[in-house]
């Protein structure tokens, strides 16, 4: 495994009454068995395409050809998409060498100031564009795309990723000579990170898509092969979240990576968990925190505020990494604990200290320990949380793949725009 999942800090025998008793937890873990059986059947019969992605290789050559087209002559790529069409790519891009060209700019909002500022920094003759919309009708993405078409002047350096059907995005792509890549209709945006939506920007950034999927396969295969749900970290995590909600009122779940390269991962998780589980009056609210930064903004609340949260800390083995704090400059006696240590040692110590402090204060805390963070480890983490979410949905009795509540806002947005005055440029 590419990470260690440590759950002892969620139980009362380790943290006191704030944790679950083993008797409370056991029935929930047993309830994950039907969910695991369902995943095995879906994997075998192909009815859940996202489970087939880790072993797929046939789709990669076409994606790689498009990725190579963004090589020579292009300094910047603007990726248009929102939600799952963007967050997966951003999560993977966090692993990339940022000095590498082309740089990728993920533009997932329609704030006009931000958009104007971005365009002002780019050369239209050396800029490529990727527009991702599963439905082909996402208003924000289409608005951005039309603006950039006019700015660039032609669609030769554009790629559209959408379902293989007639849609606004498909028609625009064909009319302007854009490259077209298919978005699998059976994979929802928030579950699409291992597909073209994440793999295309990853390949442009020089990341290894095969290793990414191999990491995901290691988690999926272990989960499907296990006969004891206690040996499936995703089943353990789902059962913990639901048991803590049921017995301890833990209606919020905090994901706190001690690693900047996992900061966007936590945003990806936030959408995945919220949009998949927040239905029929149930679910838990995901919160993104980042160590060490949020020790100075949220930790006071976590330690002394309401006892309504599950904490998941992600700790990377970085104690020997980073610059060393020079003893000749850190000569003040009050800096003795820092002198001669690396910056990574400080990060490592703070992460471990936060975890221990949370548990000493009776706050349910689990750990994800990583020896390294690369494509395989990232793929493993992504698959873990997708499986954990799907299993948690089973325990809560909701469909993890729909999002009916968001449609009302889309309808109202179109109504408001239809009544707004036009601006001709």
Image (cartoon, helix red, strand yellow):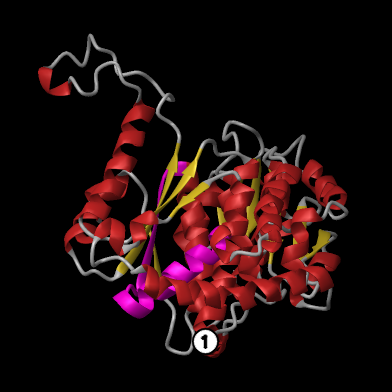
Direction front: furthest residue: 23
Whether residue 125 can be seen here: no
108 displayed left or right of 223: left
Q: Is residue 268 magenta?
A: no
17 displayed left or right of 273: left
Residue 285 lies, in percent from the top left, at 39, 72
Q: Residue at x 42, y 24 (%)?
A: 320
Query: Compared with residue 413, is residue 259 higher up or lower down, i.e. above or below?
Result: above
**Residue 369 or 9: which is nearer the viewer?**
9
140 displayed left or right of 187: left
Whether residue 137 can be seen here: yes
**Residue 174 or 19: which is nearer the viewer?**
19
For the N terminus, give its image quadrant: top right
SS at mark 1 in the image: helix
Residue 299 lies, in percent from the top left, at 24, 54
**Residue 403 or 152: which is nearer the viewer?**
403
Task: Using the rendered view, name the quadrant where residue 376 is placed.
Answer: top right
Residue 51 lies, in percent from the top left, at 73, 64
Residues rendered magenta in the picture: 232-260
Q: Which residue is mark 1?
A: 405
Residue 346 lies, in percent from the top left, at 31, 31
Q: Residue at x 70, y 63 (%)?
A: 224
Q: Residue at x 27, y 42 (%)?
A: 353
Q: Residue at x 62, y 50 (%)?
A: 380
Q: Residues within 10 Å of mark 1 (few under 14, many from 20)?
A: few
**Residue 117 or 247: which is nearer the viewer?**
247
Query: Compared with residue 290, is residue 318 higher up or lower down, i.e. above or below?
Result: above
Direction left: furthest residue: 333
Q: Is residue 251 magenta?
A: yes
For the C terminus, give its image quadrant: bottom right
């Amino acid at each position: 495994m590419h990470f260690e999942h440590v759950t002892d800090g969620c139980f009362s025998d380790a943290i006191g009454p704030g944790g679950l008793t083993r008797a409370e937890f056991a029935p929930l873990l047993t309830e994950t068995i039907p969910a695991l059986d369902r995943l095995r059947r879906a994997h075998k019969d192909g009815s859940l395409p996202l489970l087939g992605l880790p072993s797929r290789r046939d789709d990669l050559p076409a994606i790689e050809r498009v990725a190579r087209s963004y090589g020579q002559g292009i300094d910047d790529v603007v990726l248009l998409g929102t939600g799952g069409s963007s967050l997966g790519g951003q999560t993977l891009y966090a692993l990339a060498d940022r000095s590498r060209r082309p740089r990728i700019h993920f533009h997932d909002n329609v704030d006009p100031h931000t958009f104007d500022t971005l365009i002002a920094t780019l050369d239209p003759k050396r800029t490529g564009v990727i527009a991702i919309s599963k439905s082909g009708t996402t208003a924000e993405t289409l608005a951005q795309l039309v603006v950039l078409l006019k700015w660039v002047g032609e669609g030769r350096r554009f790629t559209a990723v959408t379902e293989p059907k007639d849609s606004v995005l498909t028609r625009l792509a064909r009319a302007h000579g854009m490259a077209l890549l298919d978005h699998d209709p059976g994979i929802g945006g928030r579950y699409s990170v291992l597909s073209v939506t994440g793999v295309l920007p990853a390949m442009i950034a020089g990341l290894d898509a095969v290793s990414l999927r191999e990491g995901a396969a290691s988690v999926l295969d272990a989960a499907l092969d296990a006969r004891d749900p206690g040996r499936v970290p995703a089943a353990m995590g789902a059962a913990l979240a639901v048991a803590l909600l049921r017995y301890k009122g833990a209606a919020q779940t905090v994901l706190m990576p001690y690693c900047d390269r996992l900061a966007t991962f936590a945003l990806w998780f936030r959408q995945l968990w919220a949009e998949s589980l927040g239905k029929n009056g149930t679910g838990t609210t995901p919160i993104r925190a980042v160590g060490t930064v949020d020790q100075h903004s949220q930790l006071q609340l976590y330690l002394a505020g309401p006892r309504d949260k599950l904490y998941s800390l992600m700790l990377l083995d970085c104690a020997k990494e980073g610059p060393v704090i020079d003893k000749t400059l850190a000569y003040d006696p009050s800096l003795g604990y820092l002198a001669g240590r690396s910056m990574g040692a400080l990060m490592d110590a703070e992460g471990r200290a936060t975890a221990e402090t949370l548990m000493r204060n009776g706050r349910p805390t689990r750990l994800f320990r990583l020896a390294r963070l690369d494509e395989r480890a990232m793929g493993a983490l992504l698959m873990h949380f997708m499986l954990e979410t799907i299993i948690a949905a089973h325990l809560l009795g909701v469909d993890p793949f729909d999002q009916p509540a968001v449609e009302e806002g889309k309808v109202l947005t179109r109504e408001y725009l239809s009544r707004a005055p036009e601006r001709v440029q």
